[in-house]
Image (tube, coloured by chain):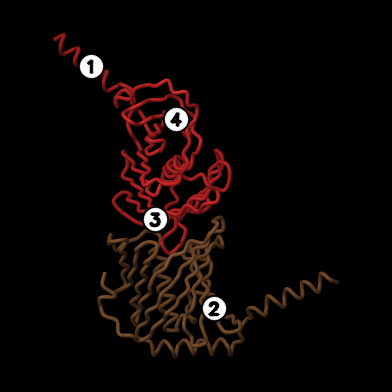
Chain colours: A brown, B red
Amino acid sequence: MRKVVYILFLTVLATSAQTKMSATEANTLKNTVKALSEKTETITSDFIQYKHLDFLSNDIKSEGKLAFKSPNVVKWEYVKPFAYSVLFKDEKLFINDNGNKSDMDMGSNKIFKQLNQLITASIKGDMFDSSEFDVLYFKNDTNSEVHFTPTDEKFSEFIKVFHINFNNKGEVQEVKMIEPSDDYTQIIFSNRKTNKPLSDEVFAQ
Amino acid sequence: MRYLLSSILLILCFSCASYPKKNGFTATNSKKATITNPYFSNTAKDYVYKANIDAFGSSFGGIFIVKKLGQNHHRIVFTTEIGNKIFDFTFKGDDFKVNHILKKLDKKILINVLKNDFKVLIKEKLLVEKGFQQDLNSIYKTQISNKNYYHFVSEEKLHKVIRINNRKEKVVFTFSEIENNIANEIQISHQNINLKILLKAL
């Protein structure tokens, strides 16, 4: 009996942290994100990335900046502890690895492209209906969390599921990419500024 | 004629001289039975490097991670900057396991090259077969996975390892910016194939 109570208690605890959204709630979230994205021309944001590998003592931390310009120009720039940037522009991927420039990359290319698509889409709000992902909606006290499971077999070799966290304004707070091995990359955004004019220089390679 | 013959002989002899002889190493009566590579020996430490790899005309970067999990037990993972795994290997004793590798890199030849190279990075205790001296270097002939190596030590620091096959240098490993048993810069340079790996500690 004690065991049953314990399990019940645990279940309640687990579900109170995060519950599945109703269809109405999911629709409200979709509309909030969509309405925000329609008003969004540019975004700049800082980010902190934690790479979690189960066998390491500590997560690997790196920091950088994100710049976005509607409809689909995105620049990811790592600043610490190394200098590395990736720019998506005109359907191309430009890499600047501490001064070494290239427009080709092995392995990461597809990931970045999909991530770019996901970030861009989550800003625009039209990915919820994408056929490339199975989508599940959750909520906790203040935020919404949406899980995107890639349907493409090739892509699921890299990523088992994406978790994207939205605040109540519909802004992306956090992205978590979980690999098939359950190791993950967590990216937390901060200092977000929208519709600040961005010069072309920001997106120059 | 005799002169010509002897010069041919001399040239022949020179070219067939052993690697140490060719490079002017002096044999020593070193009593050292083993030498130690300390660079990935601390289980409490996560070894994380920014990697740049030049391979067969293309160049790419990533994060190179080494973790010692126990005696003769290491995990080596290479990821993109954003964190997605490119390969993930386990070395345990003489066993080697590929936990993950991108499908397009899943080639036996490539995996073998990487396996042999990384084994040199993590192999801690090495049996000395012969000892030599050259300038300030103490040089130790060793074997790792049945391949011949020379380990170069100066000022008590291991700073170079060379793989030799048929008296020729095949792969040169250099360890530099060394402090507290950490090599902050490591270079693996293949002489017979177009592959160079540069690691810088983060």
The label nearer to you, 4 versus 1, is 4
At x 49%, y 90%, the residue is: A31
> In the rendered image, which residue does mark 4 sit on?
B142
> In the rendered image, which residue does mark 1 sit on?
B10
At x 39%, y 21%, the residue is: B28
Both labels 2 and 4 in a single chain: no
> In the rendered image, which residue does mark 3 sit on?
B50
Q: What distance separates the C-alpha of mark 2 from that of mark 1?
A: 76 Å
Badge 3 element = strand
Residue A6 sits above or below residue B142 on the image: below
| Circles 3 and 1 in contact, beta carbons < 8 Å | no
> In the rendered image, which residue does mark 2 sit on?
A146
**Chain ID at mark 2:** A
Residue B171, how many percent across, how many down?
36, 38
Quadrant of the frame with the N terminus of chain A: bottom right
What type is the residue that disc 4 sits on?
Thr
What type is the residue that disc 1 sits on?
Leu
The label nearer to you, 2 versus 4, is 4
Badge 2 element = strand
Question: Could you say which quadrant of the image residue B23 lies in?
Answer: top left
Both labels 3 and 1 in a single chain: yes
**Chain ID at mark 3:** B
What type is the residue that disc 3 sits on?
Lys
